Image: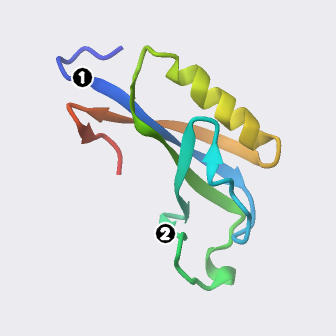
Amino acid sequence: MNTSNSQRQVAGFDVFIEAPFTAQIPQQLADFKLECTASRGTKLKGVELEKRILDVHWLCVRYMFPTPQDVNAGTSEKILKAVEQLGQKYNWSSLIKLYVADGKPQYS
């Protein structure tokens, strides 16, 4: 529960998936748009990197709502539905909600 006076909203989520560097990650997933893909903290989108160094077969993919959503507006269910859809193709290990508070990202 949020005990501060800030307006907290859900902006999207990060999910770690088991997939090779060359995986074709969906650009759109339910209500979400793919923002970036990372491997061990290095963003991969649009960057040519040496596969044998970064391809550990676990990628962090970030999906965002078009605009932040109220935390009580069924966002958890929307996220779980999107992850379930992604899970039909990829094994996933962890899921992190991304919040904004008073219009400022609470994630990096």
Q: How is the image coloured?
A: rainbow
Q: Secondary structure at mark 1?
A: loop
How far separated are the C-alphas under marks 1 and 2? 30 Å
What's the residue at 62%, 75% (across, down)?
54
Instruction: Specify the quadrant that holds the N terminus.
Output: top left
Specify the amino acid type for callout 1.
Gln
Numbered mark located on residue 37 in the image: none
Q: Residue 86: x, y in percent? A: 73, 43
What's the residue at 64%, 42% (across, down)?
29
Comes first in the chain, label 1 or label 2: 1
Q: Is residue 103 left or right of residue 31?
A: left
Q: Residue 5: x, y in percent? A: 17, 17
Query: Mark 1 — residue?
Result: 7
Q: Nearer the viewer, residue 56 or 83?
A: 83
Q: Quadrant of residue 53?
A: bottom right
Vertically, is 36 above or below 89? below
What's the residue at 52%, 17% (across, down)?
74
Q: Is residue 76 left or right of residue 72?
A: right
Query: Mark 2 — residue?
Result: 42
Q: Secondary structure at mark 2?
A: strand
